[in-house]
């Protein structure tokens, strides 16, 4: 499947703005406007995946986010990983590679996606 041109992308965005006003969760799936809504959304999504790809967050960014969400300090993370605060500091400054053992714990205890850990 080919990606839409920029002109088609802009046109799809404008049409989506119109459709949002008339299509909602209660609109039947068989309704032609619902089908058009999905088609236009797909055009926009495919174009943005190619031209505005965000990519994965870095492991350090995700660890810091999880620490913030879970209200963990570096010493708490060190305890969780059964390691030293200096090793945690090296991990977070991206000066040291995370060991497989620690990666496994991060995945299990902080629920960090394996794709992010392995990137």
Image: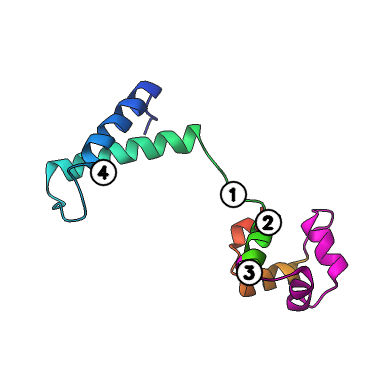
Residue 82: x %, y % from top left: 79, 78
Query: With respect to residue 27, does 65 lie above or below?
Result: below
* The label number, if any, that marks residue 9 in the structure image: none
Q: Secondary structure at mark 4?
A: helix
Query: With respect to residue 6, does 51 lie above or below?
Result: below
User: For the residue carrying disc 2, how many other residues have a C-alpha within 10 Å: few (<14), some (14-19), or many (20+)?
Assistant: many
Which residue is nearer to you in this view: 36 or 23?
Answer: 23
* The label number, if any, that marks residue 56 in the structure image: 1
The residue tagged 4 is: 38
In primary-sequence order, the first of circles 4 and 2 is 4
Magenta-drawn segment: 69-98
Q: Residue at image x 77%, y 62%?
A: 98
Give the CA distance from mark 2 to mark 1: 9 Å
Q: Secondary structure at mark 3?
A: helix
Which residue is nearer to you in this view: 68 or 103?
Answer: 68
Give the CA distance from mark 3 to mark 4: 34 Å
Viewed as shown, does residue 50 lie left or right of 10?
right
In primary-sequence order, the first of circles 3 and 4 is 4
Report if residue 91 lies within the magenta region.
yes
User: For the residue carrying disc 1, how many other residues have a C-alpha within 10 Å: few (<14), some (14-19), or many (20+)?
Assistant: few
* The label number, if any, that marks residue 59 in the structure image: 2
Give the CA distance from mark 1 to mark 4: 25 Å
Residue 104: x %, y % from top left: 68, 71
Q: Quadrant of residue 19?
A: top left
Q: Quadrant of residue 67?
A: bottom right
Quadrant that contains the N terminus: top left
Give the CA distance from mark 1 to mark 3: 16 Å
In primary-sequence order, the first of circles 1 and 3 is 1
Viewed as shown, does residue 89 lie left or right of 19?
right
Give the CA distance from mark 3 to mark 2: 11 Å
């Amino acid at each position: 499947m080919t990606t839409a041109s920029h002109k088609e992308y802009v046109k799809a965005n404008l049409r989506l703005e119109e459709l949002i006003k008339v299509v909602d969760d209660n609109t039947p799936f068989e309704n032609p406007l619902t089908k058009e809504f999905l088609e236009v959304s797909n055009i926009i999504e495919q174009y943005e995946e190619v031209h505005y790809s965000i990519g994965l967050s870095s492991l350090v960014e995700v660890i810091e986010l999880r620490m913030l969400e879970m209200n963990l300090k570096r010493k708490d993370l060190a305890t969780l990983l059964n390691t030293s605060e200096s090793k945690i500091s090296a991990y977070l400054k991206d000066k040291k590679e995370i060991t497989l053992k620690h990666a496994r714990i991060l995945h299990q205890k902080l629920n960090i996606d394996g794709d992010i850990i392995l990137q």
